[in-house]
Structures are given as structure tokens and as C-alpha cells.
Amino acid sequence: MNKQLIISFLVLFFSIQSSFSQTDDKGSLSVDSKTFLEGSEEFNPLSPSRAAFLSAILPGLGQAYNKRYWKIPIVYGALATSLYFYTTNNNTLKDVRRTFRLRAAGEPTTDFELFSDQSLENAQNTLKRNRDTSLLIFIGLYALQVLEASIDAHLLQFNVSDKITFNPRLLQRQNSEQRYVGLSLNLNF
């Protein structure tokens, strides 16, 4: 059943062979940059790199440069959460290591009395892995907020005018009753 569906889809996809276009003898189309960027600020190609640079210096500064102030608490919340888990795992790891070393030296300890030596060793491995994962997540989130600031600055310069439309529709040949799947992209200036 799946093989027949795939074959019929491929036959349908590759059987559409005709295309047509409309010609207009009114002359060539020219777009003025002021008309194209109507409603937006002046185009600045260095804006994305500046936003990324500012965000790399201080997290959230690139988002402030893009005037997306609502993203700043999200950035600091994400970075603070991963930093919190890093410090918690690191401090607990230090306590478990200290207890493990004191037990190995034969000295009495009051911390982690219910844990065996093997459990303390397993806890050290788990806490170290969690600490390292938290650090990698912090670095990844830091890089992600730099990337987000740069992409957001790019998208701020993108023309989102109502004059650009996308209208998919079912087309029919002009001289016959045959219908076929087609795609129409209309740009109205």
C-alpha cells in the first residue's frame, strides 16, 4: 500500500510539465529602495553584527539594542537557572568528595552517614556529570542568545508589507477542461 502511494505521488509530481507566464509590454520593473522599505527604518547592514557583539559582551544587551526588552528577563532567567544548577552540583560534589576522602583516611564524618563508600563514589560521578552538563547548557544558552539577537536584528529589517502576498490555488488550462496543481506567487507593488 505504501509503495503504491509513493509511486503515484512521484508520477503525479513529475507529470506536471507545463507552465506559462504573462508578459507585460509596459516596460521593465524598477523598485525604489525607499518604496521597498516603506514603513521601516533605514536599512543598516551592520545592525545584526552590532546586536550580536553587544549581546556577546553583556547578555541581553543585544535584545535591548533591538528594542525587544521583554526578552531580557527570559535570557537572564535561562542563564541564571543553568548557573544555579552548576553551582549547586559543584558545591554538593565538593561535600561528597570531602566526605569520601575523610572516610578513606579513617576519620569520622557526620555528613552522608547513610551512604556507603560505593554510593559516595557513584554520587561523585553523577554530580560531576550533572555539573559539566549544566556548564555546557550555560555556554549553549549564552551562544543562543547571541544568535537570537543577530537573527532578530536581521528580521527587523525584513519587509513585511501587505503588498507581498502568497496565494496557492488550483489552476485550469485555458483551452481545455484539464486541471492541474500549480503554484502562483503574486507580488503587488
Image: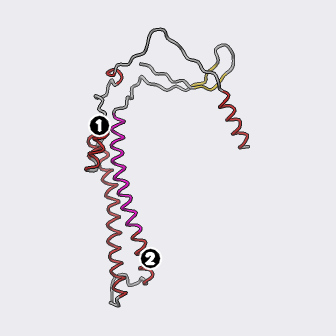
Residue 189 in the image: state x and y as whole percent. Answer: 41, 19
Mark 2 is on which residue type? Asn
Examine the image and state in which quarter residue 100 appears: bottom left
**Nearer to us in this view, 56 or 103:** 56
- How busy is the neighbourhood of tag 2: few (under 14 within 10 Å), some, or many (20 plus)? few
Residue identified by numbered label 1: 47
| Marked residue nearer the N-terminal end (1 or 2) | 1
Magenta segment boundaries in residue numbering:
129-156
Q: How is the image coloured?
A: secondary structure
Any magenta on residue 148? yes
The image shows residue 120 at horizontal and vertical percentages of: 41, 79
Does 92 appear in magenta? no
Quarter of the figure with residue 109: bottom left
Q: Nearer the viewer, mark 1 or mark 2?
A: 1
The residue nearer to you, when weighing 82 against 44, is 44
**Element carrying mark 1:** helix
| Residue plotted at (42% across, 79% down) | 121
CA gap, disc 1 to disc 2?
50 Å
Return the x and y of residue 108 as percentages of the image width and height: 33, 89
Please give left or right for residue 7 compared with residue 160 in the image: right
Compared with residue 72, is residue 172 higher up or lower down, i.e. above or below?
above
> Which residue is rendered at x = 72% and y = 42% of the image?
3
**Residue 137 x/y as whole percent:** 38, 58
Task: Say if 62 sits above or below 99 in the image.
Answer: above
For residue 77, side relative to residue 189 (left or right): left
- Image-based side of 163 in relation to 110, left or right: right
Identify the residue at image location x=69%, y=39%: 6
Split into 4 quadrants, where in the image is the N terminus?
top right
| Amino acid type, label 1 | Ser
Where is mark 2, residue-wise?
A: 122
